[in-house]
Image (tube, helix red, strand yellow):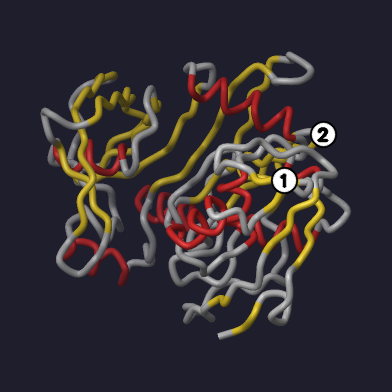
């Protein structure tokens, strides 16, 4: 355990990274390890003050606001091995004054938490300390490689979130599946529901009463036992591509949650030691400059090698 502020009241000045955030969300990040219920309690009791006044959890913060934070005991979480914060940043695909696009490797989480000591966002903040604001625009599963967008300005973050919410982006993935895909183009619409296994792992299943989800698949190439597909995300539900394909009987090669586990063991001996799911491209109108953007992430080298072996 450790004490925030050494058993004394702390005063925190809100910087640009906190502009526009709700007070509760700002505190969840600042007080990692503190139960959310306790954060809400100290806000509602008036122990948290914004510019000397009581505030609500929904209060929006501005640059320069001063927060009074009482001493809070934080638990030191047990962390799984992960990429150190000193690790090099993933390769940059594009960067301007407001956006940063990276080619994320498989095996690297987008952020720390849930037993992961650090992820892309922590590594990038450590590598680019001159950036006063840096936030994830969207997320990728830890085992998925490819295109990941970060915002360097809150205006760009809010603009990208609006595009994502309103269907203003075109996100394409490349995926290798078991079996021979029949159609050149196939639209899949299924309801999805999240659940937790007895071991505490998060899963998603097809459920008519679940959240609507829509993926468009296009056939790129066939082998006797496998198919290379492009997946266009119309909606962005958790594990959407993986669950859609598994439900249709075309599990993704190397998928440890929804795949063919016996086949995965054989593929590992042949050099495929990860899931063959890659975020290949994203197209959108730049939220600040309004330029038409199409950003592409080259296929990860280990996936290229596996395809080359199939061709041979």
**The furthest residue to the right:** 130
Determine which quarter of the picture holds residue 197: bottom left
Q: Residue placed at 54% from the left, 81% from the top?
A: 76
Q: Are marks 1 and 2 in contact (CB under 8 Å)?
A: no
Question: Is residue 240 or residue 14 the one in the foreground?
Answer: 14
Determine which quarter of the picture holds residue 159: top right
Q: Residue placed at 80% from the left, 45% from the top?
A: 65
Q: Residue placed at 47% from the left, 81% from the top?
A: 78
Q: Viewed as shown, does residue 312 lie left or right of 256?
A: right
**Other-residue count near label 2 (Cα within 10 Å), few / some / many at <14 / 14–19 / ≥20:** few
Label of residue 285 in the image: none
Q: Viewed as shown, does residue 303 lie left or right of 228?
A: right
Quadrant including the N terminus: bottom right
- Vertical position of residue 247 compared to residue 268: above or below: above
Say whether disc 1 or disc 2 marks the residue closer to the N-terminus: 1
For disc 1, the marked residue is 53
- Vertical position of residue 95 compared to residue 170: above or below: below
- Give the spatial CA distance, label 1 vs label 2: 39 Å
Residue 118 image point, x, y percent? 59, 67
- Vertical position of residue 297 compared to residue 213: above or below: below
Residue 301 in view of the camera: no
Q: Viewed as shown, does residue 68 lie left or right of 103?
A: right
**Other-residue count near label 1 (Cα within 10 Å), few / some / many at <14 / 14–19 / ≥20:** few
Q: Viewed as shown, does residue 98 lie left or right of 232?
A: right
Residue 115 image point, x, y percent? 45, 72
Question: Is residue 300 or residue 20 the one in the foreground?
Answer: 20
For disc 2, the marked residue is 96
Which numbered mark, 1 or 2, is in the foreground of this view?
Answer: 1
Residue 281 image point, x, y percent? 55, 32
Kind of element beneath mark 1: strand
Determine which quarter of the picture holds residue 286: top right
């Amino acid at each position: 355990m450790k004490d925030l502020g050494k058993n004394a009241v702390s005063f925190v000045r809100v910087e640009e990274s906190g502009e526009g955030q709700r007070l509760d969300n700002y505190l969840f990040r600042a007080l990692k390890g503190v139960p959310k219920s306790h954060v809400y309690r100290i806000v509602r009791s008036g122990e948290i003050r914004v510019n000397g006044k009581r505030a609500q959890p929904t209060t929006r913060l501005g640059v320069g606001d001063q927060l009074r934070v009482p001493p809070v005991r934080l638990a030191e979480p047990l962390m799984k091995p992960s990429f150190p914060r000193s690790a090099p940043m993933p390769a940059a695909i594009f960067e301007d004054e407001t956006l940063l696009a990276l080619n994320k490797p498989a095996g690297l989480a987008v952020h720390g938490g849930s037993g992961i000591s650090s992820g892309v966002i922590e590594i990038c903040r450590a590598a680019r300390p001159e950036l006063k604001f840096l936030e994830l625009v969207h997320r990728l599963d830890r085992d998925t490689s490819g295109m990941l967008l970060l915002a360097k300005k809150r205006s760009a973050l809010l603009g990208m979130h609006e595009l994502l919410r309103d269907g203003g982006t075109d996100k394409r993935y490349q995926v290798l599946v078991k079996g021979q895909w029949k159609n050149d183009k196939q639209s899949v619409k299924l309801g999805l529901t999240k659940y937790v296994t007895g071991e505490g792992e998060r899963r998603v299943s097809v459920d008519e009463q679940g959240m609507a989800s829509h993926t468009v698949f296009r056939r790129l190439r066939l082998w006797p036992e496998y198919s290379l597909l492009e997946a266009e995300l119309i909606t962005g539900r958790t594990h959407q591509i993986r669950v859609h394909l598994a439900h249709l009987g075309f599990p993704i090669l190397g998928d440890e949650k929804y795949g063919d586990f016996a086949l995965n063991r054989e593929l590992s001996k042949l050099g495929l030691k990860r899931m063959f799911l890659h975020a290949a491209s994203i197209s959108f109108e730049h939220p600040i400059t309004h330029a038409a953007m199409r950003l592409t992430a080259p296929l990860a080298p280990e996936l290229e090698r596996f395809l080359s072996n199939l061709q041979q």
